[in-house]
Image (cartoon, rainbow, N blue to C red):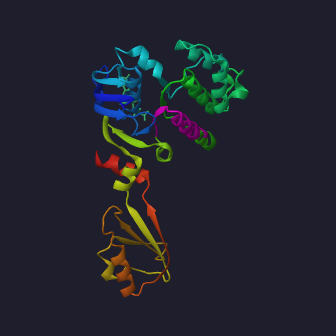
């Protein structure tokens, strides 16, 4: 199957000479959820705005559904819904009107039943006759999503969809994203919340200084770069580590009551069996144990640091 989005050697140099995108190539398959992570100013918004056709590329090509975004503008634009970071809707319009108007902009026939469904899905039905200025910040954000979905796009871009929204709305949003994906919609989101990427993305892309420094399946990334930890709850607290355990990557925590062993779970020999043997020889007993995988946040922080 042809990818739904194909970005090839994309560069963006803003007027004034600032290079915001540096030779980005990226393939996105239909119905996947891709999360773009990266520090402030990394180029995430520039990348999605370029794919959406809002910003012109300086060089490189982008195809959406096999069509070039410049020569096939009408087709590609219709396939895309964009939820921007900021609200630009008329404050005096009602929720119903602004969402219906967005659909009309794409030349789609009115479909009140569909608009009703998305407003209900986004818990906005009760507010349909309210003016935009009468809504809370979180509700306005939901309206942005309703507008982006109004013309039934096959691809949805979400630029920091849950910045500054409460936990409940965040989870509603995640459910909605999952529901859309089940219906075949491809979703690309930018986020600063690593737990968001961890919760919903299939693949993670990391952008830094305009470069895509990594794109990887979330599970592969976590398995490849994630270290594991084995935590042993000791029967008797230790004040220091016995010298015969020096070769292991160990540390004591909780006033010597916890012994933590960090290891690479992808290696054939994790060293756990040998550690157990050494502990037994040293007369160190434990009453409980558990393992922990390092989080995507740990991985992200080390990635961004590494590539400085
Ligand atoms: N119109 C513009 N003219 C010149 N430079 C710009 C313009 N828009 C963005 N930039 C610069 O391009 C870089 C990338 O900005 P962009 O908004 O794409 O980053 P981002 O990764 O989305 O950041 P954030 O996480 O803060 O939203 C920044 O250094 C920004 O100042």
Quarter of the image with the N terminus is top left
**Outermost front residue:** 1
* In the foreground, 265 or 297: 265
**Which quadrant of the frame does ligand 1 lie within?**
top left
Dividing the picture into quadrants, the one containing residue 105 is top right
Q: Is residue 275 magenta?
A: no
Is 182 in the magenta?
yes
User: Relative to the observer, which residue lies in front, 278 or 247?
Assistant: 278
- How far across and down, in percent of the image, does residue 212 sit? 31, 37
Please tell me which residue is depicted at 50% across the width and 29% down the height of the picture.
Answer: 85
Return the x and y of residue 303 as percentages of the image width and height.
33, 48
Q: Which residues are magenta?
A: 172-191
The answer to whether 187 appears left or right of 43 in the picture is right
Vertical comparison of 219 with 133: above or below: below
Q: Is residue 150 left or right of residue 22?
A: right
Q: Residue at x 38, y 48 (%)?
A: 300
Residue 151 position, x and y percent, is 55, 20
Asked where in the image residue 116 lies, by quadrant, the reply is top right
Instruction: Indicate the position of residue 45 as horizontal and vertical percent values.
Output: 41, 30
Q: Residue at left 69%, top 24%?
A: 134
């Amino acid at each position: 199957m042809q990818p739904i989005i194909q970005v090839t050697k994309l560069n963006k140099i803003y007027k004034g000479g600032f290079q915001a995108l540096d030779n980005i190539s990226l393939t996105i398959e239909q119905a996947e959820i891709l999360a773009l992570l990266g520090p402030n100013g990394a180029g995430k918004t520039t990348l999605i705005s370029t794919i959406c056709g809002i910003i012109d590329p300086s060089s490189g090509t982008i195809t959406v559904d096999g069509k070039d975004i410049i020569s096939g503008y009408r087709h590609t634009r219709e396939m895309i819904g964009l939820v921007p970071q900021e609200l630009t809707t008329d404050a005096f319009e009602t929720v119903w009107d602004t969402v219906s108007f967005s659909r009309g902009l794409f030349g789609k026939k009115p479909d009140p039943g569909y608009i009703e469904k998305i407003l209900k899905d986004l818990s906005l039905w009760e507010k349909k006759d309210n003016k935009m200025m009468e809504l809370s910040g979180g509700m306005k954000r939901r309206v942005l999503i309703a507008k982006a979905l109004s013309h039934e796009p096959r691809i949805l871009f979400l630029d920091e969809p849950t910045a500054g929204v409460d936990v409940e709305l965040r989870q509603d949003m995640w459910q909605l994203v999952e529901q859309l994906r089940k219906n075949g919609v491809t979703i690309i989101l930018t986020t600063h919340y690593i737990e968001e990427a961890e919760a919903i993305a299939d693949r993670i892309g990391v952008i830094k200084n305009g470069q895509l420094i990594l794109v990887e399946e979330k599970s592969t990334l976590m398995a490849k770069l994630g270290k594991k930890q084995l935590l042993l709850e000791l029967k008797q607290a230790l004040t220091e580590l016995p010298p015969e355990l020096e070769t292991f990557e160990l540390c004591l925590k909780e006033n010597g009551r916890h012994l933590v062993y960090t290891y690479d779970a992808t290696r054939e020999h994790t060293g756990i069996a040998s550690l157990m043997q050494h502990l037994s020889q040293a007369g160190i007993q434990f009453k409980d144990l558990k393992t922990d995988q390092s989080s995507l946040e740990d991985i992200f922080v080390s990635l961004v640091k590494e590539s400085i």
